[in-house]
Amino acid sequence: MTSSTITAVLCPDCRHENEPERVYCHGCGAKLDRSAVNQAQKDDMKDTQQRVKKLFDPQRAKVRVLFFRISKLALGACLVAGLVQMLLPPDVPAPVKSDILASRIRIDLENATSRHQSTQLQYTQDQVNAFLVYALKTKQKTLDKPLLDFKRALVEFREGACAITTERSFFGYSVYTTASYAPTLTAGKIVASSRGGSIGRLPIHPQIAQLMDILFADVWSALDWEAKLVAKLGSMEFHDKNVVLTTAQK
């Protein structure tokens, strides 16, 4: 029992309830039995002393210091590991170049959107990557950013998904950013839901990866004409290492 739990002292003569701090009864003037109050105050003081002793216990202080040091060390290790993963290059295919085939893809898209019958176009991942080299090489200046020189963009096709990776140079060191999507054609527009992404080899959660679109805004702008042509088609399907484009029946 502590003093905080004693709300009144009962007078033994008149049974009047008095405040804990009173010595004499407020009702009849008789001297009150304060033994319970005094004992509660002693117990409360003892508890306070024990709490103060624990607070200044050198052993507990050492444990707290050690805990915070270990926490800082673990946090620092996680940050360093994350930075290393961001700087490590992911597994990406080697550059592919074929100007003749690449220019042919643009012609195929233009012809497909102007035809009145259903047409199916199928391209491999290497063919599309060759087209990206061809389509973006004349737009290098618009793709370069302060301290980041654009080197290339490439795609990777998986079942139902497409991942695009940009390689930029930071003082001669390559930095890779990747965003994965599940694109579909809806009402003449390309709608792409995020499947996640990565910076280097550090994976990024899909909800956070949605914010990475700003890193690819210049690439989307450079490929705006091709995107408009694809949006006019009827459907597109992504499979392992290839994509199938089908025009709508007019």
Image (cartoon, rainbow, N blue to C red):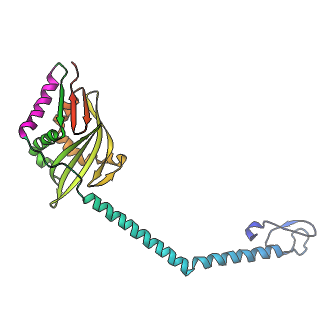
| Residue drawn at point x = 25 percent, y = 36 percent | 239
Q: Is residue 146 visible?
A: no
Residue 109 picture location, percent across and down:
15, 30
Magenta span: 99-115
Magenta-colored stretch includes residue 101: yes
Secondary structure character of the magenta stretch overall: helix
Q: Quadrant of residue 158?
A: top left
Instruction: From the viewer's perspective, tell me whether residue 237 is left or right of residue 106.
Output: right
Of 190 and 221, the residue lying toward us: 190
| Residue drawn at point x = 39 percent, y = 66 percent | 75
Residue 28 picture location, percent across and down:
91, 70
Quadrant of the frame with the N terminus: bottom right
* Callout count: 0
Magenta-colored stretch includes residue 69: no
- Determine the residue located farthest toward the bottom in the rendered image: 58
Instruction: From the viewer's perspective, tell me whether residue 106 is left or right of residue 92.
Output: left
Position of residue 176 relative to residue 249, above or below, is below
Q: Quadrant of residue 232?
A: top left
Quadrant of the frame with the C terminus: top left
Residue 83 picture location, percent across and down:
29, 61
Residue 81 picture location, percent across and down:
32, 63
| Residue drawn at point x = 83 percent, y = 76 percent | 35
Q: Is residue 173 visible?
A: yes
